[in-house]
Amino acid sequence: MIFKLAGIKRVMKRPQQRRTLALLGALTIAGLLNDLFAAAVNYDEAKVGALPLPNVLRMEDGQSVTNAAIWRSLRRPEILRLFETQVYGKLLPRPATQSFRVVAEDRTLLDGRATRRDVEMDITVATNGTALKFTLILPNHRTGPVPVFVGIHVFDTSHSYPQPARARQLPGAPKQTDEDNARAGRAALDRILSRGYGVASLNVESLAPDSGTNYWRGVARLYGRTQPGSPGAEETGVIGIWAWGLSRAMDYFETTTDVDARRVIAIGHSRMGKTALWAAANDERFAAVVSNNSGCGGAALSKRDFGETVAIITRAFPHWFCGNFSKYGGHEELLPVDQHELISLIAPRPVYVASAVDDGWADPRGEFLAALNAEPVYRLLNVGGLGVNTMPAPDQPVGGTISYHYRQGQHALTDYDWEQYLAFADRCLSNVKTGK
Ligand code: GCU
């Protein structure tokens, strides 16, 4: 050690080598690398660029989409295919064999006002199998099947008080104790359940762990992936696998009389907001979808250079997308599809996009513009749309079948957000014929 230090001191005497050493040292510090990366992120609206968006109502061959039939039979499948081949990869097929087991049920949650049910889904593909896990919380005062919000990690299923509205802590803020968290969790759950909704959360571990090296050890393994490595050109990425998992939860809802499977809302925050949108785009059994601060690869337009970009996200999280998506990092002009078209795939079903003022990374304006530019499809299908052309002021929710808000505060799924989503659900699910 002493010898090494002496050696370094010697080298440090020479200016050129001193610079090289300093540089090498800096390069090994991951945090600094991140900072350098962050420095390249644009937060200036004047520098966003002006790449044109693909016209959601024009086919790739230039043909205009003038009615609902052409939308349904030609344009919608075309857009879906572009997302499958260029962004997320095609969803895996439904497993040939799947069954559900209630592994625990506790009817005494929230002083007896709610039931917590832990479910495992056994799925088998060829001779391989795994068990997916999720937790469903139902209000006990129900008189029939209830509508449900479902998402991945909407709350922490390992916690005795699931916390569907736990805000992310600002650095330096007083640390929240378990008791604080439990209180916040109870209050949020109370709010959702007392309005007559259930809430369900899936775990990612057996589905696809959120790791570039381990994601394949989940369901991807059953479908033929045998080793680590980023997804191939059109191979399903992790967002696709998570979305597939939401559809498996929906399969369960169709089997249980406690849930109204025709009034299930896919919901997700951030990476899980991207997932909720893609799940509902593929699986039309979801009655509506809520994207909370989903950002790049979610509701935010990829062709705007603001906050996180295609280059940044595919470098940091290559496992989330199909391999092709990374080709568009720095070449967004070549991307044949953009995220307003992801929202258009939800039409005519209701969709809520939400942004936060201190969440520039997710590009709030890009999220608003994606919602706005999906509107032509909603109008074509005669269900109205956003109803405004300009981004609303903070804390002024807008919209109809497409809804949007720009909340004060940071990147999180907060009580305020839940309040808006419950009102949205009340508003738009009242027309849906109840199931069962
Ligand atoms: C990172 C990532 C985002 C993602 C977010 C999250 O910030 O860059 O794209 O939405 O994590 O999931 O919290």
Image (spheres, helix red, strand yellow):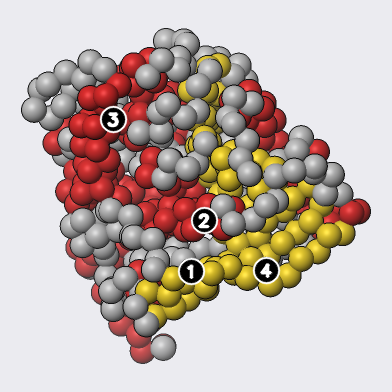
**Label 1 crowd (10 A; few <14 / some 14-19 / many >=20):** some
Cα–Cα span, label 3 and label 4: 38 Å
Pick the quarter of the image with the C terminus.
top right
Q: Which mark is residue 190?
A: none
Distance in Å between CA atoms under marks 1 and 2: 9 Å
Q: Which residue is mark 1?
A: 98
Instruction: Left or right? Give the position of 7 relative to 109.
Output: left
- How many labels were placed on the picture? 4
The amino acid beneath tag 3 is Arg
Q: Is mark 4 within 8 Å of ligand 1?
A: no
Q: Position of residue 407 (x, y in %)?
A: 59, 26
Quadrant for residue 236, please give it: bottom left
For marks 3 and 2 on the same chain, the one whose residue lies earlier in the sequence: 3
The CA span between labels 1 and 4 is 14 Å
Label 2 SS = helix
Q: Nearer the N terminus, badge 1 or badge 2? A: 1
Q: What kind of residue is marked 2?
A: Asp
In x, y percent, where is residue 262?
56, 40
Towards the viewer: 410 or 104: 104
The N terminus - image quarter: bottom left
Mark 4 is on which residue type? Val
Which residue does the numbered mark 2 point to in the structure image?
A: 251
Residue at the image point whose x is 47% and y is 43% from the top:
285
For the point 37% across and 54% down, which residue is it? 240
Q: Specify which label sits upstream in the sequence, 1 or 3.
A: 3
Q: What residue is shown with label 4? A: 102
